Image: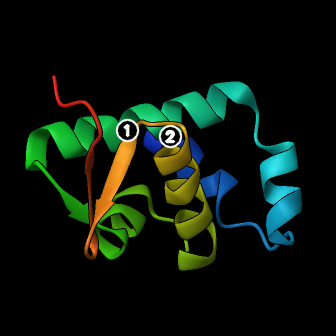
């Protein structure tokens, strides 16, 4: 497991209320998490919230709002129960 993935797991296993989690999430951590999701989707073409949650080692309570944010930012797109890259490269 990479150090970055280890850091994600530590950052996202805390018990803070969700808005507070995103308030304390450093930009660097957000970018690393986003980049990890992008890499996963490039390799696998798509992923369910459950697969992405497992990949990052976080909880559903954290991954769903994070994926919704990536959808709003135009990074990912939801198709049925899967996420794909909005602009595959």
Against 55, is 7 above or below? above
Query: Which residue appears at 63% of the width and 76% of the height?
Result: 61
Work out whether residue 65 or residue 40 is closer to the camera in this orientation and state it.
65
Q: Residues within 10 Å of mark 1 (few under 14, many from 20)?
A: some
Q: Residue 33 carries which label?
A: 2
Expressed as whole percent of the image width and height from the top left, the position of residue 13 reads 66, 67
Q: How far across and how far down the image is residue 77, in percent? A: 34, 51
- Asked if marks 2 and 1 touch (Cβ < 8 Å), the reply is yes
Q: Nearer the viewer, residue 75 or 14?
A: 75
* Side of 47 where 36 appears, left or right: right
> Tag 1's secondary structure?
helix
Q: In this view, does 19 lie to the left or right of 71?
A: right
Quarter holding the C terminus is top left
The label number, if any, that marks residue 82 in the structure image: none
37 lies above or below 31:
below
Q: Is residue 25 above or below residue 63?
A: above
In the image, taking residue 29 as reference, residue 46 lies left or right, namely: left
Q: In which quarter of the image is residue 26?
A: top right
Which residue carries the number 1 mark? 36
Outermost residue toward the left in this view: 44
State how the image is colored. rainbow
Q: Label 2 to label 1, Cα distance in Å? A: 5 Å
Q: Compare residues 13 and 79 and report the one nearer the observer.
A: 79
């Amino acid at each position: 497991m990479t150090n970055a993935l280890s850091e994600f797991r530590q950052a996202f296993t805390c018990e803070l209320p969700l808005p507070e989690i995103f308030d304390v999430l450093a930009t660097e951590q957000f970018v690393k998490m986003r980049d990890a999701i992008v890499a996963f989707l490039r390799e696998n073409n798509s992923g369910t919230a459950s697969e992405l949650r497992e990949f990052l080692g976080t909880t559903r309570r954290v991954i769903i709002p994070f994926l919704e944010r990536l959808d709003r930012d135009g990074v990912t797109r939801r198709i049925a129960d899967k996420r794909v890259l909005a602009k595959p490269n």
